Each structure stands twice: as structure tokens, then as C-alpha cells.
Amino acid sequence: MGEEMIKNEDEIAIRVKDVVKVYKLYEKMRDRVKDAFGLGRGGYKLHYALNGVNMDVKRGETVGIIGTNGSGKSTILKIITGVLHPTSGEVIVNGRISALLELGAGFNPEYSGVENVYLNGTMMGFSEKEIDAKLPAILEFADIGDYVYQPVKTYSSGMFVRLAFAVAINIEPEILIVDEALSVGDVFFQSKCYHKFEEFKQMGKTIVFVSHDLSSIAKYCDRVFLLNQGNLLGVGGPKEMIDAYKQVLVGQYKGGMTKTALDEAFEDASGTNPNALEYGDGKARIEEYYLTDENGTRTTTLLKGSRFTLHLKVRFHESLPSPIFAFTVKNVRGTEITGTNTMLEKAFLDGVSAGQVKEITFTQRADLQGGEYLLSLGVTGYEGDVFQVYHRLYDIINMTIVSDKNTVGFYDMNSKIVVKDA
């Protein structure tokens, strides 16, 4: 399943050759400072975000890139678009690129929507006259009304991404780079985005597509690249690579990585947010937290419909009458999707003593749509009529749901459908 380089250079839209991207992960901030000023080697370890990756993408081809969190998908897209530079290796791009990565990254919040259209268009190399010609199509696609004349800082997050998407999609690129951006906005706007995507494909544009929605990967892609922990595991048809990816997710991939190596890879991709909000009065502390799949493997990437378990380890520094253990799930826009706690479930209503340690597990099906989610954890309780927060960790775990069938809305009702002659 290795990638063979295309011989005819004229057929190449993108060539990634022996690309390596290495980051230094420092143990302490002072080690970073020492290293930056050449004051001796600080304490760090090398992390290979990409490790000798080779990819050829033909002109007019739609390719998908799939893999677990930390596999290098976003890194390779950023290198292709020039946002990042490789540590070694080379990338050749033949054609104008439009990247739907960090939508609206170049927007000035003080400028109006229209002013930002001109700002972005100029940055992409268009003249004012060319932007004038494209403006009606951009505004029609964004469909945010008179807000286009207001400062962007007054926009809702939905309006912001609609305008950013409209700008990126309407500049007539030869190569379109898409990273989960087709899931922006409401279901009607998403439909419009997919229609435009299909239009690009029919026009023979080159498309590189990253998504956790495997049904979209299977529907649109001619070929698929499978990455894991910075290594290219394989390239082939969508069905073949999606099947291999599912094997990776459950630790049964036979194409070159051992079960031990996969476990280590998942340990590295812990999905923990270093900037999570943390607070509480300290009477209890969540000392450990992680997810496991239905095989008991630690991971933050789960197949939709599979069972998974959230594990908490909590130490109590004071005796408490009846602590409550809780978790909630939010999407990346901050909307609370679901959650529960031991009081609602009537699973634990006892008191605890100082010095005790409790291990708590929540097991459930992952029926959320394919995409990225954030888990928040908490230990709270009532002391008399007063609600107390002992320890909370907001948005602490990044969980990815990989789906081969997305329905409308936040979760799948798993409807059973029968169609028959009347």
C-alpha cells in the first residue's frame, strides 16, 4: 500500500517528498529559554509530527487524508499551504491554492465584512477590479445580510465562518485544501458547501480533503492516504483505507504497526488540553482521567456507534457527605451536547472519608456525529443546601468521533427504516 511517485511531472498538482516535521517538547519553560539563547541543551524530547512522508496528488484528483488525533493530518496540510515549513524534505505545489483550514485567520476584527473580503482577496494576489467582480458571489454565498457592512468583531461565530468560507471558496482556486470546514453553519449552509464542493470536483479541480466523516471520504475521494503518528501507513482506494483505519482504531492493524506500537501511539495522543480551565475548593481532586474503547485500549479517537468508557480517579482530602462525579460533552463551538452525573444516574449516593481514593467509570455508546468534541469533568456536591465545587476541569479532553454515516443534528437516533409497496 506504499505511495508510488508519479513519473509525468505535468500530472502533478502536489508533491510531498520525504517530509519530516520535528518539534522539541520541553520539560520546563526554562529549558526552552536556555535552548533558544544557546545556553546549553535544555531538557526536551523530539516529537516527529511527520516522519519521512511521501505523497503525490494528481491534477483533478480528490484525495482524502485520514488518521487518529496526532497522526499529522493538519500538519501536512499546513506545510502544503505554506503555513508551516518542514524540518526537512520538500513540497512542490503547481497551482493557486485556497485553504479551508483556520477559517478567517487573516480577518481584521475592526474591519467590516466587505473590507475583510478586499483585504483577503488582496493577500491572495487579486486586484481590486477582480475582487469587485467576485464580491456579489461571495456575499450571496455567505448570506449574512447587512451584517457585511458591520465590524467583524460584532459577528456571531456562525456568521464569521460563513463569510470566511464564502471568501475561501469563491476565489476560483486550482487546488482546494479542506480540513473539516464543510461542517460549518447550519444544515442548510452545509448543504450549500457540499454542493459547491461537488461543483469543484466536476470542474476538475484538485482537492485535498481531511474529515472524520468517513461517509464523505468514501463519497468524494478517488484515493485516500492513511497517517498514524506522523507515518504514512498506506494509500489506496477509499474502502481499502477506511477498513485499514478502522483496524488501527481497534488496535488490530496488520500493515506494519504492532499492537504495542499502537498503544504507545494512543498514549502519545492523549487529547489533553494544556490550557483547560481548572478550579475548585480542593477538598477533592481528579488525579487521573482517560478514555478507553470497547477493547480497553486508551484512545481519544472512537468509532461512531461503538462503546467507550470515561475513567476518573479522584482523591479526597476531606470527608464529604455525598460527592457527585460528572462529565459533559461540548462541540467545538461550545454548545453542550450531552452529559450526566452519578446523582442523576443514582449510581453513587454515599459519603467518603478523607484520604479515600475512588475510581469512577462511565460507559456508553458513541452515537454523536463524526467530528471533534470537548469533555469537561467535575467533582461537586451539596453540603446542607449549599452547592460546592470541589474540582472542575473544563474542556480537558479532546474526543474525536469517526463516522461512516452522519445524520442531521448532534447525534444519531439510529432509526430503523422500512420502505414497502402500499
Image (cartoon, rainbow, N blue to C red):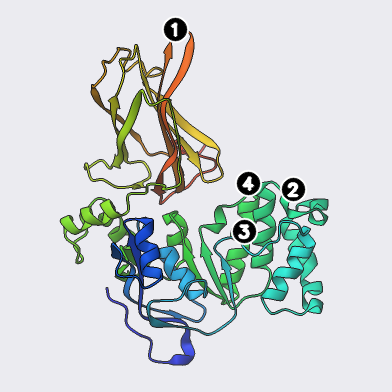
Q: Can residue 310 be seen in this snapshot?
A: no
Residue appearing at x 83%, y 52% in the figure: 146
Residue 44: x, y in percent? Answer: 29, 63
Point out the tag, 3 or 4, that comes first from the N-terminus. Answer: 4
Point out the tag, 4 or 2, that comes first from the N-terminus. Answer: 2
Location of mark 1 (residue)? 384
Alpha-carbon distance for marks 1 and 3? 53 Å
Identity, as a three-letter code, of the amino acid under mark 3:
Cys
Q: Residues within 10 Å of mark 4 (few under 14, many from 20)?
A: few
Count every numbered label the image shows and give the total. Answer: 4
Residue 188 or residue 208, whichever sits in front: 208
Residue 283: x, y in percent? Answer: 36, 22
Location of mark 2 (residue)? 154
Point out the tag, 1 or 3, that comes first from the N-terminus. Answer: 3
Identity, as a three-letter code, of the amino acid under mark 2:
Thr
Looking at the image, residue 284 lies above or below residue 123: above
Residue appearing at x 83%, y 56% in the figure: 149
Alpha-carbon distance for marks 3 and 4? 11 Å
Residue appearing at x 30%, y 15% in the figure: 319
State left or right for residue 237 relative to residue 329: left
Point out the tag, 1 or 2, that comes first from the N-terminus. Answer: 2
Identity, as a three-letter code, of the amino acid under mark 1:
Gly
Location of mark 3 (residue)? 193
Whether residues under marks 3 and 4 lie with C-beta atoms below 8 angstroms apart, the answer is no
Location of mark 4 (residue)? 186
Residue 275: x, y in percent? Answer: 45, 46
Residue 157: x, y in percent? Answer: 65, 48
Point out the tag, 2 or 3, that comes first from the N-terminus. Answer: 2
Identity, as a three-letter code, of the amino acid under mark 4:
Asp
Disc 3 on helix, strand or loop? Answer: helix
Residue 217 or residue 249, whichever sits in front: 249
